[in-house]
Amino acid sequence: MTEITIRVNGRERRIAVEAQATLVEVLRRDLNLTGPRESCGQGVCGACTVLLNGRPVSSCLTLAVLSDGADIVTIEGLAPEGELHPVQRAFVEESAAQCGFCTPGMILAAVSLLEDNPNPDETEIREYMSGNLCRCGSYPRVTRAIQSAAARMRVERP
Ligand code: FES
Ligand code: FES
């Protein structure tokens, strides 16, 4: 076991992890953060997406020991005071989730997209979000939700 210190959703956590443990395993099993989902386990579906030092990563492919010292945001950390992030609000308003399995990863990827590009067009959204798969086929609504969140954020967070 190796001790690591990570900052998760603004809170410093010191935990002992096995050398082979992935970040998604540690988040779900040890920290009880079940927002990141594990599905393919191969970096293909995006269900396990978290923000690591501000960038979206597949936490199923990230060894926990290599996250030592990192700042991590999961979906649970996007609304710390209970006020939804504009992207979360837009997903609700546009009904951009059906079963919701892909939604935490989708939202975190979208947050990162809008930080990089506050006014993405449809092609840019589809391209950026191509690593996040949705079995329910919510893609048109997800795209609309991201466009709506972008418009709102340009006003609320210029
Ligand atoms: S579970 Fe990590 S990308 Fe699919
Ligand atoms: S809403 Fe069901 S997998 Fe995306």
Image (spheres, rainbow, N blue to C red):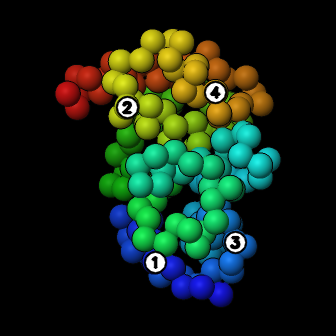
Q: Secondary structure at mark 4?
A: helix
Circle 4: residue type: Ser
Disc 4 versus disc 1: distance between alpha carbons? 31 Å
Q: Residue at x 33, y 55 (%)?
A: 81
Q: Which mark is residue 139?
A: none
Cα separation between marks 3 and 1: 15 Å
Residue drawn at x 43%, y 37% as measured from the top left: 111
Please name the residue that numbered disc 3 is placed on: 21
Q: Is mark 3 within 8 Å of ligand 1?
A: no
Label 2 and label 1: CA atoms lie apart by 27 Å
- Horizontally, is 27 left or right of 14 in the view? right
Structural crowding at the residue carrying mark 1, measured as other residues with C-alpha within 10 Å and reported as few (<14), some (14–19) or many (≥20): some
Q: Nearer the viewer, residue 80 or 47?
A: 47
Between 55 and 80, the one lying in front of the other is 55
Q: Quick check: can you spot residue 157? A: yes
Give residue 46's position: percent from left, percent from top.
66, 41
- Separation of marks 4 and 2 at Cα, in angstroms: 16 Å
Rate crowding at label 4 as few (under 14), some (14 to 19) or many (20 or more) other CA atoms within 10 Å.
some
Give the residue at mark 4. 130
Furthest residue in direction front, as rendered:
66
Going from N to C along the chain, the mark reached first, 4 or 1, is 1
Label whose residue precedes the other's in the sequence (3 or 1)? 1
Q: Relative to residue 109, is residue 22 depicted above or below?
A: below
Secondary-structure class at tag 1: strand
Residue 47 x/y as whole percent: 67, 44
Residue type at tag 3 = Ala
> Please, what secondary structure does the residue beneath circle 2 have?
helix
The quadrant of the image that shows the C terminus is top left
Q: Residue pushed farthest left?
A: 158
